Amino acid sequence: MSSDLKAYKVNFVKQNEKINIEKLDADFWEKANCLTDFCSPWKTESFSKIEFRARWNAAYLYFNFQVFDSEIYIDRKDNSTDSICNSDRVELFFRKDEKLSPYYCLEMDVDTRILDFEAYPKWNFDYDWKWPKGHLEIYSFKNPNSFTVQGKISMTSLKELDLIQNNVIEAGVYRAKFSKNENLEYEPTWISWVNPKTEEPNFHIPSSFGKFILED
């Protein structure tokens, strides 16, 4: 495991805390560290603030994206891979190690559509693969000035996929933002927690990952 990976500390959920995943309230997330240091190295324009939070217990890894953006673009022609890929979304990637053989991708939009797939280096994606059934739930909410996508991933599934080592999960945290260009076509701005240091936008590379440290 790379010791020099950018780190985010995931706070533990105490046994007496109330958990209602369909609307985890502000009190629940106040006990989480707030990750805000996202970047878009390939564009000079600014982008809306993103807050990511996560917590965990023996059963689940809980996560919450709040994006301070009211101009959300969703391609609703169908629920295909292409449709989700052409929509504003947030993303979590998980890997066993820097070989990325394989790694796992969760791309989620405000319609709670999930694009989950197994991936290998050089953009080799298996869209037939699905996160283990019953081990991932997501919810979304819209406010006048932001949207939230939050959910829970079972610790069982993370362990079965060999994604937790010594209380560390190697993960990437991303956002895709679609805006109209001068030709009135929607084009993406790619936003990442870790700067992959690539000339062209690319999340599917070892250098775009950091690590989640599961704190006691």
Image (cartoon, rainbow, N blue to C red):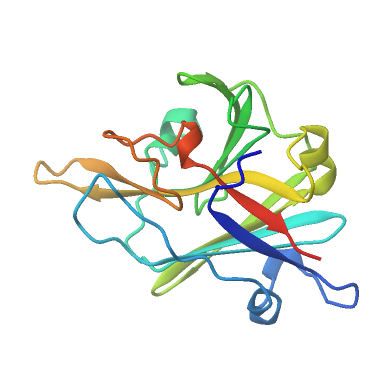
Question: Residue 130's image quarter?
Answer: top right
x%, y% of residue 102? Answer: 63, 24
- Which residue is farthest bottom? 27
Q: Quadrant of the N terminus?
A: top right
Above or below — where is 200 with respect to 145? Answer: above
- Which residue is farthest front? 3
Residue closest to the eye, 82 or 125:
125
Name the side, left or right, on which 31 lies relative to 160.
left
Q: Quadrant of the C terminus?
A: bottom right
x%, y% of residue 184? Answer: 14, 44
Name the side, left or right, on which 77 lies relative to 129.
left
Residue drawn at (32%, 61%) of the image: 71
Above or below — where is 45 with respect to 119? Answer: below
x%, y% of residue 47? Answer: 29, 60
Residue closest to the eye, 117 or 140:
117
Above or below — where is 148 with respect to 210? Answer: below
